[in-house]
Amino acid sequence: MAGVQVGPLDGRASIIEEYYTKCGLETIGPAQIRTAGLARYATLEQLIDQLLTRSETQQVIVNHGNPDGGLLVPVCKETRFSQTGAVIFMLSGLADMAEKGPIDPNNANHVLTAANDFNCTASVQGYFASTDGGKTFQNYTWDPEAFAAEGDFLGDYLAITAFGNRVYGAWAHQTTEEGKVERGKRTRTTVRVGSADFN
């Protein structure tokens, strides 16, 4: 028996729900398994919370997605950002840290993020930092010079490391210089670095 989780599917959600309610089967390769307990979710956070409460050993998740963006669903109710594939490695890292037990409150915990403005028209680079074991986080800006990619190729190049309460990061930034074509892609990209000392 498999549980069914249905994400935001616009006008097609009712068709999906009707299928699993009336048919109650999911095809996996040459076999079919029975399904039950259909539930809806609106964010990735809500999906994870629901999965943690489900008793079925298998789960069917119905959601839009693609290889680059992952599941296309808002990460949480506080944001419209829905490219979960872009942040899943950070969420996985936080989950790995949580499994090891309480985080030492004497050390800062850091997550690097490429933050957009509310309308997703410009990017600024910053990170979140916690000095109380992850109970609260403070936003910090490394690169306040916002930019819009305007079709240039930037790639997904972000890096962060922390040791001894010092944080170092690197990211791609689009400059205002004349664009050049490299390997068939137009770019005005440079690499910027930042550091912070919490001692």
Image (cartoon, rainbow, N blue to C red):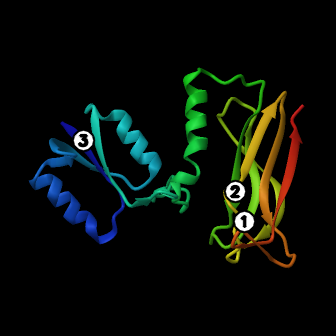
Quadrant in which residue 192 is drawn: bottom right
Asked whether the residues under the numbered discs 3 and 1 touch, taking CB atoms below 8 Å apart as contact, a structural biologist would say no
Mark toward the start of the polypeptide (2 vs 1):
2
At a point 33% along the width and 64% down the height, the residue shown is 9
Q: Position of residue 19 (x, y in %)?
A: 15, 58
- State which quadrant residue 55 falls in: top left
The tag earlier along the polypeptide, 3 or 1, is 3
Separation of residues labelled 3 and 2 (CA atoms): 34 Å
139 versus 105 height, above or below? below
Residue sitting at the far front? 183
Q: Secondary structure at mark 1?
A: strand
Asked whether disc 2 touches disc 1, contact meaning CB atoms under 8 Å apart, the reply is: yes
Badge 3 local density, few (<14 within 10 Å), some, or many (20+)? some
Q: Nearer the viewer, residue 85 or 111?
A: 85
Picture coordinates of residue 144, whole percent (x, y) = 83, 62
Measured Cα–Cα span from mark 3 to mark 1? 39 Å
Residue 123, which numbered label?
1
Q: Left or right of 178: which side holds 139?
A: left
Given residues 159 and 39, the one toward you in this image is: 159
Residue sitting at x 67%, y 56%: 156
Crowding at label 1, few (<14), some or many (≥20) Cα neighbours within 10 Å?
some
> Of label 3 and label 2, which has the lower sequence position?
3
- The image shows residue 27 at horizontal and vertical percentages of 19, 48
Vertical placement of residue 152 versus 131, above or below: below
Task: Name the kind of residue labelled 3 in the image.
Answer: Gly
Asked whether 166 or 106 is in front, the reply is 166
Q: Which amino acid is tagged 1?
A: Ser
Task: Give the tally of numbered discs.
Answer: 3
Mark identifier at residue 3: 3
Residue at image mark 2: 114
Specify the amino acid type for callout 2.
Ala
